[in-house]
Amino acid sequence: MATNVRIPTPLRKLTANNDTVAANGANVQEILADLERQFPGIKERLCDEQGSLRRFVNVYLNDEDIRFMQGEKTRVKDGDELSIIPSIAGG
Amino acid sequence: MTTHTIAAPPPDKTRRAFFTALKCRECAREYPAQAVHVCEFCFGPLEVAYDYDAIGKVLTRARIQSRPTTMWRYKELLPVAGEPTLATHVGFTPLVRADRLAKRLGLREVWVKNDTVNHPTLSFKDRVVAVALNRAIELGFDTIACASTGNLANSVAANAASAGLRSYVFIPADLESGKVLGSLVFGTNVVGITGSYDEVNRLCAEIAGKYGWAFVNVNIRPFYAEGSKAMGFEIAEQLGWRLPDHIVVPMAGGSLITKIHKSFLEFQKLGLLNDHDRDGASSAQSKIQNPKSKIHTRIHGAQAEGCAPIINAFKAGTDLIRPVNKPNTIVKSLAIGNPADGFYSIQTMKQTGGVGEFVNDAEVVEGIRLLAETEGIFAETAGGVTVGVAKKLAQQGVIKRDESLVLCITGHGLKTQEAVAGKCGAPRVIAPRLKDFDALYEQDKM
């Protein structure tokens, strides 16, 4: 069992149109690296030249924003769900 | 609710679209002007790209002034390709000279842009929905939806009803009752989410991807957001084609303040402003405060202390927004912990020499009552924030006595009654006898 990663619409071209993919890693950073191994080019969309998540990329672990946890060092375990969501607009 | 197919308006041979594409604000990649809101490369927000040369040939003061008193008098600067057929009576709300409020603030010239009376749902959200609805129809959608802290839901529900369209509005389940009823009454599908607004919006991003509906503030957002510019256009026109020295704008997601800035810049670019503003920040004082700004107006942002991620970043001198996990304020309409336009609103404040400030809940209530008691305008909690912050900025000397000020009052107080209930006193109850009233009035005279 791995971590389920929910892929937003803008990135599905890179994941053969799959909206959910499995990835392995002990924390968010490793999950992103595994995604890049499986789907080359995906990391460049999510991270800037310094390797940090881009300003408008939000990542949730089991519906919690990782910025309220340990950011990219947030640990993940088998069966967890990671969602990648563009920024949130007001209403 | 049944869905009706809206016949496309007949092609207007004299009309052409003055917008050409959508463009990423971060990396400038271009996309067709369709229902896409996020850059596929960097996730940056997309913005409508206009052909200003073509607009400049057509949009003159005379043409604007010849049109009906609605937001559509500026239609070349709004991203609807054909003639708008829906939500046609929106905008051109009063700009009220507020001398009694000015006196209480220690200022000489204060104006209230009064969107509490916007048609049809008493908030500035009618502007953005008007654009979104017309564009959604052009793009072939038959279901309109939104994520909302209340006002947007009311507007989507009302405008969808008047257009015969099916609609779904998603709100936090604990919203003020006036706002909930103000959506339900139109027959929309109201879905209450047990969570914060941010959680509602996140869910809507996923629903939009799956169901293919026109979420006005998700996949239709680049068009929707442009509707806010009309507030700024109207302010400039109603002031006599000039800009104020200061404007205070409440911030939730941070979109409105950036669109007010854009509206002033567009009017200047098109040569529609008076000489003083035509050439940019011309006064010596404004050059000192904002030497790089193209306009002299200082644009200030206002939030509630219990959810002020943009102001917190501004005060810390950074543009990196730290989201607020659990907003804690009576100002639910501004309670967005992770504001998508937070970065850009900070740029607007910095570029124009504006200041970001917040007020606590008690100051919000004072602000609502001050505006009501001096100018007869009953604003919702966001209005209390705007007035409260303006008062602070005047006290701090940021807004000087002889400088003009506009306050953006974005929604009606009847929608957030809970905020002031029990805080405005109560009727004094007497028997139906003249002598009883005489006794009451004697007390008042003392």
Image (tube, rainbow, N blue to C red):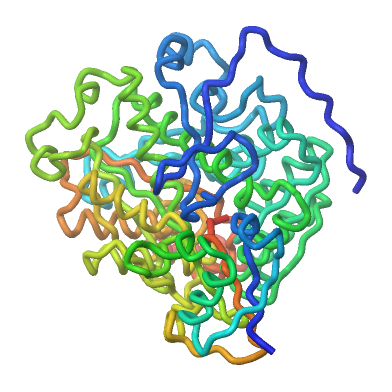
Which residue is located at x 52 percent, y 29 percent?
B92
Image height of B366 relative to B259, above or below: below
- In this view of the protein, can residue B424 be seen by the observer? no
Q: Quadrant of the N terminus of chain A?
A: bottom right
Q: Nearer the viewer, residue B319 or B125?
A: B319
Q: Quadrant of residue B108?
A: top left
Image height of B66 relative to B151, above or below: above
Q: Quadrant of residue B17?
A: top right
Residue B407 percent coordinates (x, y): 37, 45
Image height of B1 relative to B191, above or below: above
Residue B262 percent coordinates (x, y): 38, 36
- In this view of the protein, can residue B386 be seen by the observer? yes
Which residue is located at x 46 percent, y 41 percent?
B29
Which residue is located at x 38 percent, y 62 percent?
A48
Which residue is located at x 48 percent, y 82 percent?
A30
Q: Quadrant of the C terminus of chain A?
A: bottom right
Residue B121 percent coordinates (x, y): 65, 45
Residue B150 percent coordinates (x, y): 63, 58
Count of numbered circles in the view: 0
Which residue lies most toward the right here? B2
Q: Nearer the viewer, residue B97 or A89?
A: A89
Q: In the drawing, does residue A49 fall left or right of residue B245?
A: right
